[in-house]
Image: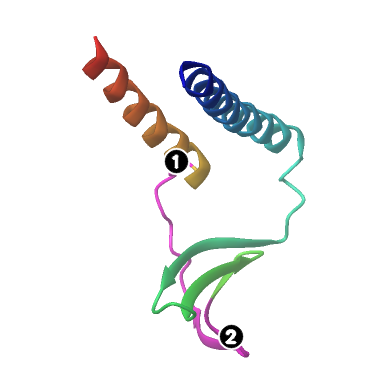
Amino acid sequence: MGGQLVQLLLGLLLVIGLIFLLAWLMRRVQQIVPRGGQVIKVVATQALGPRDRLVLVQVGVEQVLLGLTPGNITSLHVLKEPVHLPDAEPASSEFAQRLMELLGKDQKDKS
């Protein structure tokens, strides 16, 4: 019984370590890929339902609001003045930060 528990914990630690390794690799790869050559950028998205969403896309200096459904993409509005959003951390960093907070709380509880 004790051997199985040790084996289970080692497997769990291996999987968690693999997740952190892959997150680190993804950050490294994203820094290597040049982003200056992208012409089309997704500025913001907003889910309207499980499969419908609004997407604000920038093409050059022009921004277009698109409506996305499973079988259709519709241009809803072309903005006269571009929307400037404050720089935010990517979602993957937010996930990693939240995961570290949760792991930190668990470690504090054990002490």
**Residue neighbourhood size for the residue with mark 1, other residues' Cα within 10 Å, grouped as few (<14), some (14–19), many (≥20):** few
The answer to whether 69 appears left or right of 38 in the picture is: left
Q: Which percent across, then down, holds residue 4?
A: 52, 23
Q: Which residue is drawn at 71% across and 45% down?
A: 35
**Earlier along the polypeptide chain: callout 2 or callout 1?**
2
Give how far apart the Cα atoms at labels 2 and 1 are.
Answer: 27 Å
User: Is residue 66 shown above or below 82?
Assistant: below
- Residue beneath label 2, please? 70
Q: Residue at x 76, y 39 (%)?
A: 33
Q: Which percent across, then down, holds residue 71?
A: 62, 90
| Residue segment shown in magenta | 65-89
Q: Which percent across, then down, holds residue 97?
A: 41, 32
- Residue beneath label 1, please? 95
The answer to whether 108 appears left or right of 100 in the picture is: left
Residue 18: quadrant of the picture = top right
Q: Which residue is drawn at 41% across and 33% down?
A: 99
Q: Which residue is drawn at 72% across and 46% down?
A: 36
Q: What residue type is labelled 1?
A: Phe
The answer to whether 41 appears left or right of 90 in the picture is: right
Question: Is residue 70 within the magenta segment?
Answer: yes
Marks 1 and 2: in contact by CB < 8 Å?
no
Q: Which residue is at the far top?
A: 111
Q: What residue type is labelled 2?
A: Pro
